[in-house]
Amino acid sequence: MRFHIVLRYVGLALLLNSILMIIASVIAYVHSDTALMPLLYSALISILFGVFPLIFVPSTSYITNKEGLLIVVLSWLLSCLVGSLPYFLYGGPFDFTNAWFESVSGFTTTGSTILSNIEALPLSLLFWRAATHWIGGIGIIIFVLSVLPFLGIAEMVLFRSEVSAMVQENFQLRARKAIQILAGIYFGLTLLQTIALLFCGMGLFDAITHSFATIATGGFSTKNASVAYYNSPAIEIVIIVFMLLSGIHFGLLFSVLVGGGKEFWRSSVVRYYLLANVVGVAFTAINIHGPIYNSWTTAIRYSAFNIISVGTSTGFATADTSIWPALSHIFLLFFASQCACAGSTSGGIKADRIVLLWKAFTRQIKKLMHPNAIIPVRIDGKAVDDELVSKSLLFINVYLGVVLLATILLVATGTDILEAFSGTIAAMGNVGPGLGSVGSIGNFDSIPTIGKWILASTMLLGRMEIYALFIFFSPKQWKKRVSY
């Protein structure tokens, strides 16, 4: 293990953070706001820790799988740590725990917050808050690689360490090509949504920050009432469209641009993802029509935005979903667990694994009826390797196990069971709002200090898809040959 090489690549991730901190500092200077010095100090610290490894450690194009895994995990952890400095130095509602929680929530694109008055923050800190979403949405490592020269084997290892097995299975391309596609789609969607929101009457600053949060499927808004502040059907429709797009495998979005979209519509995962959202919106609208909203138009409007927001792990809100009927809560919890597609910026179990789970279940039924038959799991006519099926089913089990364990730990700290369970699902799926006091118009400030650390850890587990963080904190694993 060459720790100096690891530090060199982690330094690049910290430098990326410093660039956006400097942009936030410029905003602070222009508006003469009180976050200028906290942002400048944080940028300076990030630059120092980022530059020193680049000066003293020689460049290399070869890194091992083990080094790649360590680079990815350390980049996430140290970016979250450095990202918490502007909050902590600013003070106010941010002690170290709250600063860490807000930073982790931003970088993991969870969107949960401890703030009760978001609009009291200076514009520069609101920009930094949104920027952490944008960096984390596509993945810190992939963001760095997208602006670096060709790195050969190092690039391939880092790409493989950053993205999940589900994404690798779908991206049958060289690492450089896949990274270019991810970055191009990501930047393009951000630009297009910003322009669309401007046409709908949103100001430039809010259009940029809400686009950062939408394309990253993050959910940090600059307003206390989230998107409900604007009370604009046009703005809501634009955000719905881009939330749905951001929840689809970016490689399939690219195929629409270059190949007319045949692969896109042929994808059973995309069809399931879109159909599930339509069905969820329809049933929720039926459920909230009458007891909550008298008008069908209003019921469909609020159902569509909030179900799709949760179902893509974005977490924006236009209504207080905590007062919706219990059946609607079930829909919200299901979509907060599943979320969108692999290869997107979404969190959660992923629609791909749900499709694989169903295919594996139907195969098992067939095998019980025909014990001697060889029946492969097929998606879009292609046989899926049994190892990938097993990994996906194991992931679902471990995922739900983490949710159960974190819920138990939160309840042990004195947290209400509804808030503990829904908050854990929201954290693990990188969704943001839960139910009750941590719901769509609430915040996580009432959670005990130890509970905030539990939820922040859960966010990181969800964002890094569990295994990377477990391996990192398992010393015995580093003594073995790790292939990840």
Image (spheres, rainbow, N blue to C red):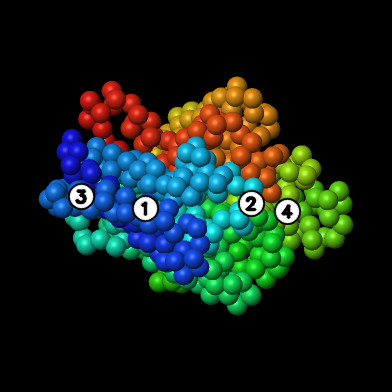
Residue 283: horizontal and vertical position, in percent?
Answer: 74, 50
Circles 1 and 2: CB distance less than 8 Å?
no
Of the numbered discs 1 and 2, the one sitting upstream in the chain is 1
Above/below status of 475 relative to 92: above
Q: How many marks?
A: 4
Q: Residue 281 falls in which quadrant of the image?
A: bottom right
Residue placed under numbered mark 2 in the picture: 117
Q: Amino acid at mark 4?
A: Ala
What is the quadrant of the C terminus in the image?
top left
Q: Is residue 332 visible?
A: no
Crowd tier of the residue under label 3, counting other residues whose Cα lies within 10 Å: few below 14, some 14–19, many 20 or above:
few
Which label sits in the foreground, 4 or 3?
A: 3
Circles 1 and 4: CB distance less than 8 Å?
no
Crowd tier of the residue under label 1, counting other residues whose Cα lies within 10 Å: few below 14, some 14–19, many 20 or above:
some
In this rendering, would 431 be left or right of 261? right
The structure residue drawn at horizontal position 49% and vertical position 66%, both measured from the top left corner, is 32
Q: Amino acid at mark 1?
A: Tyr
Q: Amino acid at mark 3?
A: Phe
Q: Amino acid at mark 2?
A: Asn
User: Marks 4 and 2, Cα distance to the nearest angstrom?
Assistant: 17 Å
Of the numbered discs 1 and 4, the one sitting upstream in the chain is 1
Residue placed under numbered mark 4 in the picture: 319
Residue placed under numbered mark 3 in the picture: 52
User: Marks 1 and 4, Cα distance to the nearest angstrom?
Assistant: 38 Å
Secondary structure at numbered mark 4: loop
In this rendering, would 46 be left or right of 425? left
Residue 215: horizontal and vertical position, in percent?
Answer: 50, 60
Residue 242: horizontal and vertical position, in percent?
Answer: 56, 64
